[in-house]
Image (tube, grey):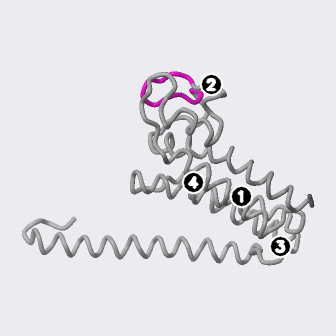
């Protein structure tokens, strides 16, 4: 087995573990809970989960999608996030071999995780926490700097990362402004006598 194939397998296994932690972020960040304490527990009965309960994908399958202690259903989102993260990390390692692009592959994996967690939170709450977007932007710029120093082919350098961050921020501001304008017009038509403030 070549080193590149081994790295793809290792990356996929790492992705499964990171996917398990991503589920913690998806559950706790919108609720303002600590991501470290208390340790993993069932959200229904609060029973602390042991190592056999935390094996990515396999625990969910072996338990039939239910808590071992209270038998409450566990959302299918948990193994889906773990599988997507494992698959994503494996694909990144295959397309951008870490032995070739260096830190750039790790940067892509971190940013992939942030995007996946943000998407799952957005599906649940229609919000994306600043705790994800702001560090994600800073990390993107940092990895752009590292890519430029390493001369990583096919990955953005510092200038490209800054340009992408500004474009992304500008797009969000434009959507916010347009959305506010549309909602204001809708409110004016529905309630013409209401004061605008």
Question: Quarter holding the C terminus?
Answer: bottom left
Residue 35 sits inside the magenta stretch: no
In the rendered image, which residue does mark 4 sit on?
132
Compute the Cα span from label 2 to label 3: 43 Å
Which label's residue is closer to the chain start, 4 or 3?
Answer: 4
In the rendered image, which residue does mark 2 sit on?
50
Question: Quarter holding the N terminus?
Answer: bottom right
Q: Residue at x 65, y 28 (%)?
A: 52
- Who is closer to the viewer here, 118 or 89? 89
In the rendered image, which residue does mark 1 sit on?
89
Q: Secondary structure at mark 2?
A: loop
Which label's residue is closer to the chain start, 2 or 4?
Answer: 2
Circle 1 Cα neighbour tier, 10 Å, few/some/many (<14 / 14–19 / ≥20):
many
Q: Nearer the viewer, mark 1 or mark 4?
A: 1
Residue 42 sits inside the magenta stretch: yes
Which label's residue is closer to the chain start, 2 or 3?
Answer: 2
């Amino acid at each position: 087995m070549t080193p590149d194939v081994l790295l793809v397998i290792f990356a996929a296994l790492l992705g499964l573990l990171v996917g398990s932690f991503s589920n913690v972020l998806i559950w706790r960040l919108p609720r303002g809970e600590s991501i470290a304490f208390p340790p993993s527990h069932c959200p229904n009965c609060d029973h602390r989960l042991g190592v056999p309960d935390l094996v990515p994908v396999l625990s969910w399958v072996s338990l039939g999608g239910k808590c071992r202690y209270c038998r409450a259903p566990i959302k299918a989102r948990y193994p889906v996030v773990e599988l997507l993260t494992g698959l994503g990390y494996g694909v990144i390692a295959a397309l951008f071999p870490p032995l070739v692009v260096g830190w750039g592959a790790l940067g892509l994996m971190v940013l992939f995780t942030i995007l996946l967690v943000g998407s799952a939170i957005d599906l649940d709450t229609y919000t994306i926490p600043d705790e994800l977007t702001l560090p994600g932007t800073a990390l993107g710029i940092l990895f752009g700097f590292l890519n430029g120093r390493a001369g990583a082919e096919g990955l953005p350098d510092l200038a490209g990362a800054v340009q992408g961050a500004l474009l992304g921020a500008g797009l969000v501001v434009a959507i916010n402004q347009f959305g506010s304008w549309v909602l204001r017009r809708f409110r004016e038509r529905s309630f013409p006598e209401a004061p605008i403030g």
